[in-house]
Image: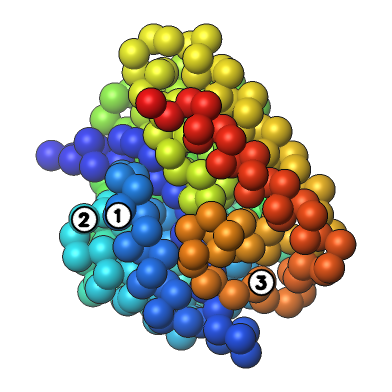
Amino acid sequence: MRDLEKYKGIIPAFYACYDKDGNVNPNGVQALTRYFVEKGVKGVYVNGSSGECIYQSVEDKKIILENVMEAAEGRLTVIAHVACNNTADSMELARHAQSQHVDAIAAIPPIYFHLPEYAIAEYWNDISSAAPDTDFVIYNIPQLAGVALTMSLFAKMRENPRVIGVKNSSMPVQDIQMFKQAAGDSYIIFNGPDEQFISGRVIGAQGAIGGTYGVMPELFLKMDEYVKSGDLDTAREIQYAVNEIIYKMCSAHGNMYGVIKAILKINEGLELGSVRKPLAALIKEDETIVTEAAEMIQNAKAKFLN
């Protein structure tokens, strides 16, 4: 019997944590994990886009996941993104994730070459076969992966009993409805685009995974409360405030995740380092944006958290 309840809620995408030399910092990973436990989120999504997975080695990803699991101590639902741009490395990470007793693994489709649907399905199923006792989540992010999860491919993947749902980061909210209607309540659809959080929840997403949740988890938790209670007017007000914060963070020269890490240092005292090249690090001119965004988060929490 599927246990989908452990996936229903706010699941921040985990950020890459580096030391001053740009190497993975286990202490930072554990500190960030404990931060999420203290904030009361449902779980974490490890080694995904927000974790800069494209620019990390297999060994990097193993170190990060091991330290997340050690610090979480069973208090978080953990979904490990294991996709690499070749099947062998992806399967190795899937086996490792299962050995760490994660709740689920996830994978984007292969990028760069545009593969036919049967090849994408084989790639995902090969990965899943390496973790036969672990749930599998399809990650649909066509604007970055270059290929979209079609209804026919989704139907094919549901033949795999380990597939439990879709992390849907496509921009059309309608995609959530289509996946939800096709799969029914025995599958879970996660909202992906943070700027459309309440839209995705209202149309059928039962869980949510997002890259900006980690810098302001209280606001997403509060939005979720209002959606559940039916107070969509207040939920919308918070969504607008959150979106303004996201727009501000995206206005920097440096990559948004560099901005987020700098904000977490100001607001939460977390030392997570910078971002890994070729992602753009922050420059001096970004300092004002970081400070303003940090204050916007503080003000929003003061306004909406009771």
Left or right of residue 8, residue 255 in this image? right
Residue in the image at 74% along x and 39% along y:
247
Determine the CA span between mark 1 and mark 3.
Answer: 23 Å
Q: Distance between the residues labelled 1 and 2?
A: 7 Å
What residue does disc 3 label? 275
Q: With respect to residue 18, does 245 lie above or below?
A: above
Q: Residue at x 81, y 48 (%)?
A: 251
Q: Which residue lies furthest to the left in this view?
A: 1
- Marks 1/2 in contact by CB < 8 Å: the verdict is yes
First along the sequence among labels 2 and 3: 2
Q: Pick the residue in front: 211 or 98.
A: 211
Residue to which mark 2 is pinned: 75
Which residue is under mark 1? 37
Name the residue: 48% across, 26% down. 304
Q: Which of 12 and 32 is in front in this view?
A: 32
Which amino acid, by three-letter code, is at mark 3? Val
